[in-house]
Amino acid sequence: MQLFAKLCRDDVPLVRRVASHSLGIMFTNAVTVLGLSSISEPEGAINRLIIPLYEELARNDQDSVRLQTTENCVMFGRAITEIMKKDPKSFMQQEELTDKILPLLVSTIEDRSWRVRWTAASKFNEAVHAFSFLTGAVAELIPAYEKLLQDTEAEVRTAATFNIADVARCSDKVGPEVVDRLLMRVATLTDDDSEHVRAALAMVATELAPILGKDKTIQHLLPPLLLLLRDPSSEVRLNLISSLSPLNDVIGVDLLSQSLYPAIVDLSEDRKWRIRLAIINHIPLLAKQLGRDFFSEKLSKLCVAWLGDDISTIREAAAKNLMVRFQTLFPNH
């Protein structure tokens, strides 16, 4: 462990980066080898060597070294959680260590390097789940996550948005008010300047419906989703249409059909043939979700119209799709 500590402080940044990448594994192995009691020893190897390395590497001048901070903190959280499950009596000692490590994780969201913040955003769901067993940890992490959703860099906001449903699933640890705060962010993200952020939101926002329940979904989640269905970007609309299943399971299709059909029509006539092809490929899923009546009255007309498309790939996909859907919906004909 002393030799490993020297590598973490090596003069060459590449060496420090690789050593930092192994820090979380080192902590887990140290606890396994030395035993649970090692955590409570003030002068033991954990407190004397490993924890100071966490703090030093999290503040290293090289952003390639700091990039490992989030993953190391996640591994720390997982290890501490496993110890807590096996030995709840050791809570006080673990709480002292967590009080040192958790601020390092929170600090990554304000790092001067956007790559460090992007890494934190992309792994924040893992961080929340890793620390969710520890009292008060998630409540401390949520404000940091909200900052990532408002980051100045679109790439960071996009990575954070992809995790919004996973973070909300930890609401049982801190109460429903966390989901309410995330819902406010969903409404804000529908107006984000970046098409990529809105496209990411469209892919995951419907996963909030089972967490919220029918009433809250209709009252708070449905309005921003309907805005996404009218988004100027075809990618955003397509992403939402392809992820309707969780929403449909909670509220049914009736509330969506009036807004959904115009969005499907717009995509079916999009000037980009790849968008038209994508919506054709989603027709089987839509037909399954929306039911036979909706397909017969609405979608079947679009399927026939695609047979006259200028692009041969579209015509071929439409013909195959129409044949499959007809055989599925009308097996006796």
Image (cartoon, rainbow, N blue to C red):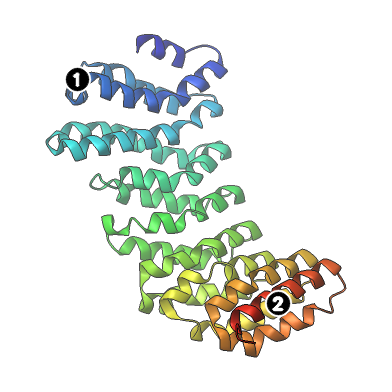
- Residue at the right extreme? 310
In the displayed structure, 55 sits above or below 8; it is below
- Residue 68 in view of the camera: yes
When the figure is inspected, residue 9 is found, relative to residue 92, above or below; the finding is above
- Work out whether residue 263 can be spotted: no
The picture places residue 99, in percent across and down from the top left corner, at: 27, 35
Amino acid at dot 1? Pro
Q: Quadrant of the C terminus?
A: bottom right
Label 1 belongs to which residue? 42
Indicate the quadrant where residue 309 lies. bottom right
Q: Are marks 1 and 2 in contact (CB under 8 Å)?
A: no
Q: Nearer the viewer, mark 1 or mark 2?
A: 2
Task: Indicate the position of residue 332 as horizontal and vertical percent values.
Answer: 60, 86
| Left or right: 103, with 146 as reference point | left
Q: Residue at x 29, y 45 (%)?
A: 137
Give the amino acid type for the residue marked by disc 2 in the picture: Met
Residue at 18 percent of width and 31 percent of height: 93
Mark 2 lies on a secondary structure that is: helix
Q: Earlier in the sequence, mark 1 or mark 2?
A: 1
Residue 241 against residue 66 in the figure, above or below:
below
Q: Quadrant of residue 281?
A: bottom right
Location of mark 2 (residue) = 323
Q: Residues within 10 Å of mark 1 (few under 14, many from 20)?
A: few
Front-most of residues 107 and 88: 88
Q: Considering the numbered disc 1 on the image, is that residue within a helix, a strand or a loop?
A: loop
Residue 172: mark in rendering? none
In the rendering, at what x and y percent does residue 118 appear? Answer: 54, 43
